[in-house]
């Protein structure tokens, strides 16, 4: 089952896709956000191309767990994704995903200019991989219990 990961930003939308087994996440080209209609159209093309069956959208909670302006925007976008594509949409806590992506890119010695080009894609990969890892761990625990 292919799963799509989305990191919703003001100017760019980071996109990632799982492999067919739903084990690993890979980054796809970032979508430059124009308007909601165009953004949904671009996402639809990806869904169709890869046969996506589920969408994981990053939910940018504040560090105390509360929902700020960006989180409310993500919740609204999640509803639009559900209505537009009739696919299950799950929200994944994305606290620190951009920070983790930034740290990784700094460690790989990327210049600030190069980091800016791929940071959203990396954040989307981290969001989706976090979901995939947790799902795999839950399956393993369930198998051990039964």
Image (cartoon, grey):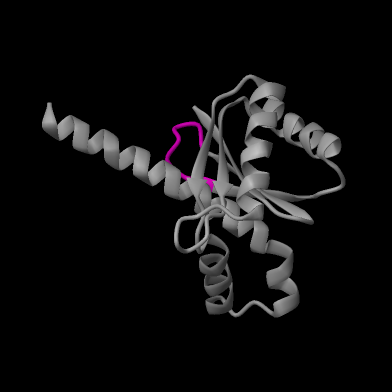
* Relative to 143, 79 lies left or right: right
Task: Tell me where residue 51 appears, x and y as whole percent.
Answer: 62, 25
Residue at point 35% right, 44% down?
Answer: 134
Residue 10 vertical position relative to residue 106 in the rendered view, above or below: above
Task: Tell me where residue 48 appears, x and y as whole percent.
Answer: 70, 25
Q: Which residues are magenta?
A: 19-25
Residue 83: quarter of image: top right
* Relative to 134, 66 lies left or right: right
* Relative to 115, 20 lies left or right: left
Q: Is residue 24 magenta?
A: yes
Q: Quadrant of the C terminus?
A: top left
Q: Is residue 36 magenta?
A: no
Task: Tell me where residue 99 appears, x and y as whole percent.
Answer: 54, 69
Residue at point 45% right, 56% down?
Answer: 65
Task: Tell me where residue 52 appears, x and y as whole percent.
Answer: 60, 28
* Count of numbered tags: 0
Residue at point 85% right, 37% down?
Answer: 38
Most distant residue in the top direction: 86
Q: Nearer the viewer, residue 68 or 89?
A: 68
Residue 54 vertical position relative to residue 140 in the rendered view, above or below: above
Residue 98 vertical position relative to residue 58 in the rendered view, above or below: below
Residue 143: quarter of image: top left
Residue at point 59% right, 58% down?
Answer: 122
Q: Main secondary structure of the magenta part?
A: loop
């Amino acid at each position: 089952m292919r799963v799509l990961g989305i990191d919703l930003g003001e100017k760019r939308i980071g996109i990632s896709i799982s492999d067919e087994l739903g084990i690993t996440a890979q980054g796809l080209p970032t979508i430059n956000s124009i308007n909601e209609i165009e953004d949904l159209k671009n996402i639809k093309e990806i869904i169709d191309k890869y046969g996506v069956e589920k969408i994981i959208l990053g939910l940018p909670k504040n560090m105390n767990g509360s929902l700020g302006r960006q989180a409310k925007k993500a919740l609204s976008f999640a509803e639009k994704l559900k209505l537009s594509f009739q696919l299950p949409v799950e929200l994944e806590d994305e606290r620190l995903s951009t920070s983790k992506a930034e740290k990784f890119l700094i460690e790989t010695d990327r210049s600030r200019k190069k980091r800016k080009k791929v940071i959203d894609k990396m954040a989307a990969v981290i969001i989706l991989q976090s979901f995939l890892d947790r799902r795999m761990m839950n399956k393993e625990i369930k198998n051990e219990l039964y």
